[in-house]
Image (cartoon, helix red, strand yellow):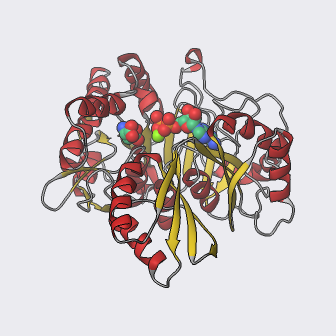
Amino acid sequence: MSRFERSKLLVQKYGGSSVASPEHIRNVADRIIACQQEARHMVVAVSAMGKTTDQLIGMAGQVSSRPVGREMDQLLACGETIAVSLLSLALQDRGVPAISLTAAQCGIRTDGSFNKARIANVETGRLVHELESGRVVIVAGFQGITSDHEITTLGRGGGDITGAALAAALQAPVCEICTDVDGVYTADPNAVEGARLVPELSYEEAIELAASGAKVLHPRAAEICMQYDVPIHVRSTFHRRQGTWIRGGVMENAAVVGITSDKKIAKVTLLEVRDEPGLAAAIFRDLAREDVNVRLIIQAAATHDRNRITFVTDNDQVDRIKELETAWRKRKIVGEVQVDLDVAKIAIVGSRIASTPGLAARMFTALARMNVNIDCISTSEMKVSCVISRQDLDQAVRAVHGEFFGTAKAAGGRTPASKRAATSKPNTRRTTAKTSASRRRATAS
Ligand code: ADP
Ligand code: ASP
Ligand code: MG
């Protein structure tokens, strides 16, 4: 038995691409053993192997026309359960005491919203007991359990949320998000050649980047860590170099820290909406009741007592909107509903967007140079985003990235498998404070 000491705890999360095959799992086991030389206690959240979750969703689609709800969570949670047992077996095979736990076994309590549950609390008793017994604790990411013992999942990419929640509940000194790229970049490094690694971000910048499309981190993971003041280190699974630190106290990053894009959207236009008080309220209440996420709303000035309302939503919510259209037409609220799936969103993100004049103009000029037509625009304190045609997206992202960050070749996004050996010692967050000023120069002007 060794007494649990928070300062000697390391919480890590490994994503699906990091555990995609038995070979990957053996490598992660070796990496965990290397990390154990620095940390006395380790809690590791793990995602399903590779594309397992997509495959399970695909199978559900072959047996059901509407695969949602409780049974989907029963199904999808299996992916993570497989991954944790395999990783625990690999560690035990190397002589390291380890135990895998499902969310139910370790007490990750959620509300009852199947497919997109929110964590209410994490019971730490079992975790601490296992750590004190000297075991590496491998926890299934993405899963939760309700007070009625129902299995839930946290939404796509939810393994990050589990990692953050474990780190917050155990008051860990850091939450490491280990993934297939070297950290958070100025744009998706697998899509934009000149994307640069961002050494340091504030929680707010990370949340905005993640929420507007930077898939490398789930926005709710950054929100949890911000709330509990746990620094996040997004880094590569395949080597031990520093990645991106996300934490409080980041003073002044560049005005634009990144360019994001999102293809999974739909633009919905409601035509001939009656121009009467309370109708917009009724429409958006209906959308909320059907759990439709609405992100950008534009209402054009009324002509002939009729309004036109446009909004952007996730492309997988279109079926629910079609169902609402029938109800709205019956109630004579709306004349017609047009859904455009051939759209995408591009955004510039940074904490000084609102206070730095000219950034939107530079973005629009870069798009105009490529002849990209802007469909809708929305701005907030930390973001300017444009809806454009889907087919223009890739060149648009490259052009806007070039405008703010230049087009120099990247130092490398995805780490080649040949560099996987985890040999060098990990640095701690102490080192980043010292060098953060010089690193910040890597970001935009
Ligand atoms: P994991 O399986 O580890 O959870 P994800 O596939 O969810 O990994 O996220 C990592 C991917 O996020 C990268 O492979 C990269 O293509 C993508 N990505 C998108 N935007 C960014 C960005 N700004 N910085 C880094 N990666 C990004
Ligand atoms: N396996 C889940 C997904 O693919 C959760 C995750 O990978 O974070 O969405
Ligand atoms: Mg992910």
Q: Looking at the image, which residue is at 85% across and 53% down?
A: 362
Q: Is residue 195 above or below residue 442?
A: above
Relative to the observer, which residue lies in front, 315 or 236? 315
Q: Looking at the image, which residue is at 71% across and 48% down?
A: 258
| Residue at far bottom of view | 277
Q: In the figure, is residue 255 to the left or right of 323? A: right
Q: Position of residue 169 (x, y in %)?
A: 36, 60
Q: In the figure, is residue 95 to the left or right of 150? A: right
In this orientation, does residue 209 appear?
A: yes
Q: Is residue 422 above or below residue 106?
A: above
Q: Looking at the image, which residue is at 32% across and 26% down?
A: 91
Q: Looking at the image, which residue is at 56% across and 73% down?
A: 306
Q: Position of residue 294 (x, y in %)?
A: 49, 62
Image quadrant in which you'd find residue 88: top left
Q: In the figure, is residue 398 to the left or right of 82? A: right
In this orientation, does residue 37 appear?
A: no
Report how many numbered discs are placed on residues in the image. Answer: 0
Relative to the observer, which residue lies in front, 187 or 440? 187
Image quadrant in which you'd find residue 192: top right
Q: Position of residue 223 (x, y in %)?
A: 50, 61
| Residue at far front of view | 304
Q: Is residue 20 above or below residue 214?
A: above
Relative to the observer, which residue lies in front, 327 or 296? 327
Q: Position of residue 153 (x, y in %)?
A: 29, 48
Q: In the figure, is residue 320 to the left or right of 423? A: left
